[in-house]
Amino acid sequence: MNLIKMQSSLFPIIFDEFFKNNWNINVPNNSCPLTNIKQNDKHYVLELAIPGKSNNDFKIEIENRILNISILDIDQESDYNYTIQEFKYSSFNKSYDIPDSIDIEKVDSLYRNGVLSITFP
């Protein structure tokens, strides 16, 4: 049993609070994208798996140190009836508190190969 928690990250523990209450890691939901969080010695990256979209489909805002990510998916007519449809994401909205230690002017986003990445320096 360890009585001391080792902090291997160079970033403050405040990020633990940032991510602690905002993730339902083991609860799959077709209308809420699967999420990864990764870090290195320079930044954190929030990744959301959202296939089949374009840059213009996303609304990403930071207001009052709250990051809001949303997408409005308008159902389009299809010539097909689906037997199984596992990767369609409908509209969603996710919000995250941003710690004071993050410079929100330097937060950046990129959508490539079906993954929306948001980088926190």
Image: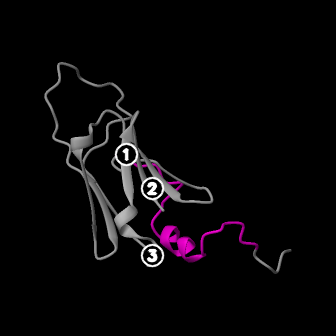
Foreground: 44 or 23? 44
Q: Quadrant of residue 68?
A: bottom left
**Residue 90: horizontal and vertical position, in percent?**
26, 44
Q: Earlier in the sequence, mark 3 or mark 1?
A: 3
**Amino acid type indicated by mark 3:** Pro
**1 to 49, vertically: above or below:** below
Q: Earlier in the sequence, mark 2 or mark 3?
A: 3
Q: Name the main secondary structure of what is drawn in magenta.
A: loop
**Residue 19: horizontal and vertical position, in percent?**
50, 67
Q: Which residues are magenta?
A: 6-30
Question: Which residue lies at the image location 53% right of the left edge and 70% below the top edge?
Answer: 20
**39 to 78, vertically: above or below:** below
Q: To which residue does mark 1 refer?
A: 110
**Residue 107: horizontal and vertical position, in percent?**
39, 60
Pointers 1 and 2 in contact (CB under 8 A)? yes
Q: Quadrant of residue 56?
A: top left
Secondary structure of the residue carrying tag 1 is strand
Q: Quadrant of residue 93?
A: bottom left
